[in-house]
Image (cartoon, grey):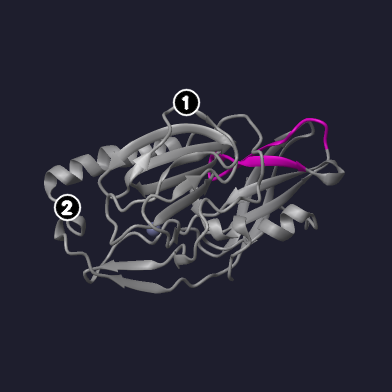
Amino acid sequence: MMVPALAAAPSDSFISRALNKPVPGGVAVVDLGNGVEPPKATYQGKPVLVVKEQGNRWLAIVGVSLTVKPGSQQLAVRDASGSRNLSFVVGDKKYPEQRITLKNQRQVNPDPNDLKRIESELALQIQAYRSFSPGTPSNLILDKPVNGPLSSKFGVRRFFNGEERNPHSGLDFAVPAGTPIKSPAAGKVILIGNYFFNGNTVFVDHGQGFISMFCHMSKIDVKVGDAVPRGGVVGRVGSTGRATGPHMHWNVSLNDARVDPAIFIGAFQP
Ligand code: ZN
């Protein structure tokens, strides 16, 4: 028998006010109540970041992927008092479209060898996004990795040479090649590579599935296993991979859902 889920209690914390943007590609902050031990939360079968707010309340910081349909969603919670489901509501958000012209047609329609390479690179990157380390992130409000204007927003539906491909999974900053890219929070380097689409890429695990990815870099300054302080340089801006010019592309992921990095730097627009 299906047990109806309890509606999550509203939370009026600083973290909720800053980060609660429950739309596809956004973040849901769910109040898990008081307790001595941290509750465990899972969403769509994946472990979720749980932090303690002022007043001893536990908050789940849930990433909502772009593929989630608006409506009621379930968070499974387990703590000292047992297991329960909490529901939260995901609203709608319309993302704009963008048309991009690439001179290299292989970057639009890769050949069979490219496809093999892309598939294995994707598997490595998904594995990185799914890693879940126990540490609590140093900060949830993130520093900008570079200082510069935004050039492409998250979630934009992209048509390369007229053909629709995956929506934009991160945020682009228009900054010159060579600009140092600084880690927006402390973390550990869990994957680096030179990939077909992303070019030179670094994954930084900030703790509990909260992960940053930087790509199209001209140079990587870290290696796998390195501990990176908040503000530590991980590499330099470039245009490697599928890029029309130098820029810094930054993904933020929670529970293996790519979410809008603008939320974490206070630049989100509904
Ligand atoms: Zn980008």
Q: Is residue 96 above or below residue 52?
A: below
The residue at 60%/40% (across/down) is 230
- Image quadrant occupied by the N terminus: top right
Whether residue 146 is visible, yes or no, is yes
Front residue of 235/24: it is: 235
Return the residue found at the far top: 225
Amino acid at the residue labelled 1:
Gly
Amino acid at the residue labelled 2:
Pro
- Which residue position holds label 2? 110
State which region is magenta. Answer: 35-52
* Circle nearer the N terminus (2, 1): 2
Q: Is residue 229 above or below residue 3?
A: above
Front residue of 22/52: it is: 52
Q: Is residue 223 magenta?
A: no
Disc ID at residue 225: 1
Return the residue found at the far right: 55
Disc ID at residue 24: none
> Residue 80 at what x, y percent from top left?
78, 30
